[in-house]
């Protein structure tokens, strides 16, 4: 984000509420999220038995949304994330 000049003086990304197109992320950031971060988090949500670890993963996902806005959840991520949220709310999650 720094290399793309997308951070302000407080190292915060200035995103706008609404559609992801309103505050696009640099392509390399989106690619990193899609190829590294989310697959790791989703794998942990699939396999982890420790509720505290799952809670931390969900907290990190929330923080990503707060820091990067709706563009962080573009593509398949939003759909897959909703699947996990529904599982947790229905108390059918693996943990």
Image (cartoon, rainbow, N blue to C red):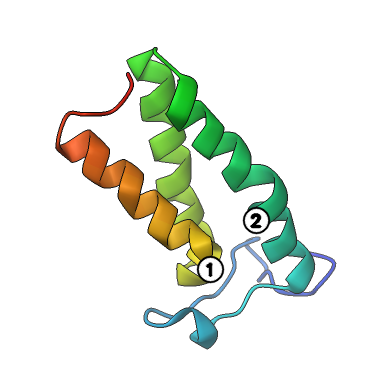
The residue closer to the viewer here, 25 or 45, is 45
The location of residue 85, given as percent across then percent down, is 28, 44
Q: Residue 95's image quarter? A: top left
The residue closer to the viewer here, 55 or 75, is 75
Q: On screen, 51 above or below 9? A: above
The residue closer to the viewer here, 89 or 25, is 89
Residue located farthest toward the right when viewing the structure as drawn: 3
Q: Which numbered tag is attached to residue 34? A: 2
User: Secondary structure beneath disc 2?
Assistant: helix
User: Secondary structure beneath disc 1?
Assistant: loop
Residue 66 in view of the camera = no
Residue 56 in view of the camera = yes
Residue at which label 1 appears: 75
User: Is there a contact, CB below 8 Å, between mark 2 and mark 1?
Assistant: yes
The residue closer to the viewer here, 90 or 68, is 90
Task: Name the residue at 45% across, 29% down.
Answer: 46
Task: Name the residue at 50% across, 87% down.
Answer: 22
Task: Name the residue at 51% across, 62% down.
Answer: 76
Determine crowd level at label 2: few under 14, some 14-19, many 20+ residues with C-alpha closer than 10 A: some
Numbered circles on residues, count? 2
The location of residue 75, given as percent across then percent down, is 53, 68
The location of residue 2, given as percent across then percent down, is 78, 64
Q: Residue 16's image quarter? A: bottom left
């Amino acid at each position: 984000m720094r290399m793309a000049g997308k951070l302000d003086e407080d190292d915060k990304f200035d995103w706008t509420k609404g559609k992801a197109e309103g505050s696009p992320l640099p392509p390399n950031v989106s690619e990193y999220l899609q190829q590294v971060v989310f697959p790791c988090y989703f794998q942990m949500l699939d396999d982890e038995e420790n509720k505290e670890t799952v809670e931390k993963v969900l907290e990190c996902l929330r923080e990503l949304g707060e820091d990067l806005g709706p563009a962080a959840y573009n593509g398949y991520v939003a759909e897959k994330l909703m699947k996990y949220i529904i599982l947790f709310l229905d108390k059918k999650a693996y943990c």
